[in-house]
Amino acid sequence: MNSSSIPGKPLNKIVESCPPSGIRRFFDIARQMEGVIALGVGEPDFVTPDVIRSAGVKAITDGLTGYTSNSGLAELRTAICAYLNRSYGVSYSSEQECLITVGVSEGLDLALRVLINPGDEVIVPTPCYVAYLPGIEFVGGCPVTVECAPETGFEIDPDAIENAITPRTKALLIASPANPTGAVQPAHILQRLVDIAVKHDLYIISDEIYERLCYDSPPLCMASLKGAQNRTVVLNGFSKSHAMTGWRVGYCCGPGNIIALMTRIHQYTMLCAPHMSQVAATVAMNEGDAAVNLMIADYKTRRSVFVAGLNALGLECKMPGGAFYAFPSIRSSGLCSQEFAEKLLFEEKVAVVPGDVFGPGGEGHIRCSYAASVSSLTEALKRLQSFLDRYRAAGNSAQ
């Protein structure tokens, strides 16, 4: 294309100032290399369970390839609301308080667009998922970060959250279990956050995509806490728990007036989640528990092996309570997060994500997904040992 034919007027400044995803950068490099052990992208290494895949295939062969209602299949919304009521005692109307989205990512975008006006502040505990801060900025909001300390296992400090509140604060964005740390917030901490939200009249956006992946304590739905339901938008889906990342099905539950506005944007943009994926998700919700429980048990075994191995290498890492991530400190290596991740990838062919891409508090750490076989994790630890021996020896000789 002739460069002179390209318009010269400026593009969106907010989008231009947003860096590309730090996760995808390493993923794209690793895909072009042979022999890489990929511990970078947050995706289950399991194939979607057979009962769910079969339902999706049948939906296609039955011709269920058109649009659904904007809100999503009624049977899927009914199954979701029944699950939340059965599991947490939270009662939602499947007709007015539940929306099926194209993954949880769309749900987060819709919630932010509806709740946030330009200039509103959203408090986000960090380190956090890479999409949170840009997502707030894309809608004209101002992210306010509050660091969680690794010494506490990245537990949220409610006092620090309350101290960050200003007259412009509109919402709290919380994830438990969290990406990248795997931290599961205790129920009493979450209740204090709800109490703070009530006191200051704030909304809560609760990203619960890893809700089923809790290993040491029961799962919890934020909306089940006292005072939470009428100010909370719950985001969840099937990608992580049911190994359905490519099916792109998420859901949002919340107050009817908020869900109605989220649906209004959704109907003008995404229209609906894929029909066949929604059919598969309905079967996942109704018949997928046995497969999910097997995957959870496997993740728990991998977690124990991998986190013990990291600590044995001198990469301090508290046992994460959920998700499938370890977030060890790499300060003992003498390298910053970006250097560590790049050198480890090119020299030892192990792909991890540098911690600094997850916001304040992430530097000095790397995110490792243990959604990989035990043999792959064991080999990754051997390569990490070789890598650390080399750089620690170099550091000692330089002194």
Image (cartoon, rainbow, N blue to C red):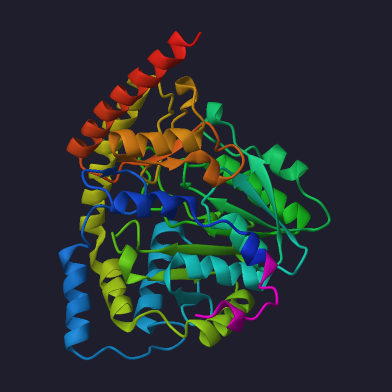
Q: Position of residue 195 (x, y in %)?
A: 68, 49
Asked which quadrant contains residue 274, the reply is bottom left
Residue 216 lies, with reference to residue 97, above or below; the image says above
* In-front residue for pair 265/211: 265
What residue do we see at 59% from left, 37% from top?
361
| Left or right, residue 147 beside residue 370 | right
What residue do we see at 52% from left, 86% from top?
267
Residue 2 belongs to the span the image colors magenta: yes
What residue do we see at 33% from left, 77% from top?
278
Q: Position of residue 187 (x, y in %)?
A: 53, 43
* In-front residue for pair 116/313: 313
* In-front residue for pair 217/113: 113
What residue do we see at 30% from left, 32% from top?
306
Q: Is residue 198 visible?
A: yes
Asked which quadrant contains residue 125, the reply is top right
Give the total of numbered labels.
Answer: 0
The residue segment tinted magenta is 1-13
Is the stretch drawn in magenta largely helix, strand or loop?
loop
Residue 120 belongs to the span the image colors magenta: no
Residue 393 lies, with reference to residue 236, above or below; the image says above
| Left or right, residue 185 beside residue 85 | right
| Left or right, residue 110 beside residue 286 | right
Q: Position of residue 166 (x, y in %)?
A: 81, 51
Residue 326 lies, with reference to residue 384, above or below; the image says below
Q: Position of residue 140 (x, y in %)?
A: 71, 66
Q: Is residue 308 visible?
A: no
